[in-house]
Image (tube, grey):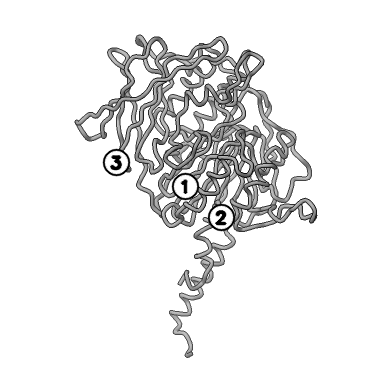
Amino acid sequence: MGELRSDTAAAVFLALAFVFVQSYAEISIGRRTSSFVRTDNLSLDMPLDSDVFRVPPGYNAPQQVHITQGDYEANSVIVSWVTPDEPGSSSVQYWAENSEIKNSVEGLVVRYKYFNYTSGYIHHCTIKDLEFDTKYQYQVGTGNAIRQFWFVTPPKSGPDVPYTFGLIGDLGQTHDSNRTLAHYELSPIKGQTLLFVGDLSYADDYPFHNNIRWDTWGRFIERNAAYQPWIWTAGNHELDWAPQFGERKPFKPYLNRFHVPYRECGSTSPLWYSIKRASAYIIVMSSYSAFGKYTPQYRWLINELPKVNRSETPWLIVLMHAPMYNSYAHHYMEGETMRVMYEEWFVKYKVDVVFAGHVHAYERSERISNIEYNIVNGLCTPKSDQSAPVYITIGDGGNLEGLVTEMTEPQPSYSAFREASFGHGLLDIRNRSHAFFSWNRNQDGYAVEADSVWLINRYWSSFERSPTAAL
């Protein structure tokens, strides 16, 4: 073949340079344990007369209003609330922001007893067949106790649809919990949906698993959860299994209060399910349900992963509570059994990122795997694996149990960054190939990132690394 023309050669050079940069964009600058030290590691509960727990005015006024995604495709919303005195109306009125036509849909009402506590009337109402990328107003209640809120539906799923998720875990209802939520709300980068990785109210940390603390927590988060969907993951503090005073049904308060669209994805339990949202496919797992081989959760997941269409939803995200990789002394190796069961599946299907909580601190891993280890071959050290996810532990919402500060030393090679502080995360998906993750500690200004990394999509990066594809 003849020589390339100079402009063609330049194009080839630039394309190859682009591929090189893309290929190495995620290489870490090395292990780092933050030098930042908090002066107070223990969180204190907000007083019960705090404004954040305020009961709305009016007889039987709806309270604890929150929304979540209502179906697999993201054009439905589940609206949930509690009426304290009587069932009242179980319907939701809703309308597109610029429309004068109001629609109404009826929901269901549930109630439960837990030891010496009886819940209010818990309403769940699914609004279906909404338009994508549209702002809706909605209202619940009747008479002088009507309350009005709004939400915005996501864009229709597509490979280059930008979207921003917030990340919070292990929140509780302390002064630090309040700082975390305020920090998230005031961030200049606005989360459109919040991914919650488990441990909600910490009601089980109070005498007799005081379920009044579920009510105060519901009123606390309403200021955000009534306006944007929170995607729920169950943690160990949602178990509420207490046979010592007659409570032998696990997850009872959680399952009554928080409904999710699990049937739409073929799941048999609301504790594990999947949804599509914009350019992301989100799989929620349950660390505290049976997950061994041939269990319902196992069977569901191994059938679910091959269904993910990375040409439509390129970003594959997994949520769970107990982290598979953790270099803190607290809860060290607790996620090992689940890692052994599922890590090879995450690598095979090129999961981009796994978010977890449980450890009350922050940590981000390198892209590593330990799938070669078979108990006799000695290959028990995680090694670099570019098909593996990044593992991010974000159980630092601010709960009353406080921070975990003791770390394993030396810092393992798989740990890229760790810090014992309270905060929240943001996953800002830009297109099919790039997303920017940042973690913000509560002690900094609202625009300060204590840790951040560009994530290169595992599925689409294989195309970008091919020179012919880049040309």
Give the residue at x 45% y 72%: 471
94, above or below 438, in the image: above
Residues at discs 3 and 2 in contact (Cβ within 8 Å): no
Q: Please indicate whether residue 427 sits to the left or right of residue 35 in the image.
A: left
Image coords of residue 76 (percent x, y): 35, 37
Local SS, label 2: loop
Q: Please indicate whether residue 115 sits to the left or right of residue 468 in the image.
A: right
Q: Earlier in the sequence, mark 3 or mark 2?
A: 3
Mark 3 is surrounded, within 10 Å at the Cα level, by few (under 14), some (14 to 19) or many (20 or more) other residues, namely: some
For badge 1, the amino acid type reads Tyr
Local SS, label 1: strand
Give the residue at x 49% y 51%: 315
- Find disc 1 in the rendering and name its residue: 281
Instruction: Return the residue nearer the eye: 112 or 210.
Output: 112
- Find disc 3 in the rendering and name its residue: 131
Q: Earlier in the sequence, mark 2 or mark 1?
A: 1
**Label at residue 350:** 2
Instruction: Return the residue nearer the eye: 113 or 416.
Output: 113
Image coords of residue 185 (percent x, y): 46, 32
7, above or below 21, in the image: below
For badge 3, the amino acid type reads Glu
For badge 2, the amino acid type reads Lys
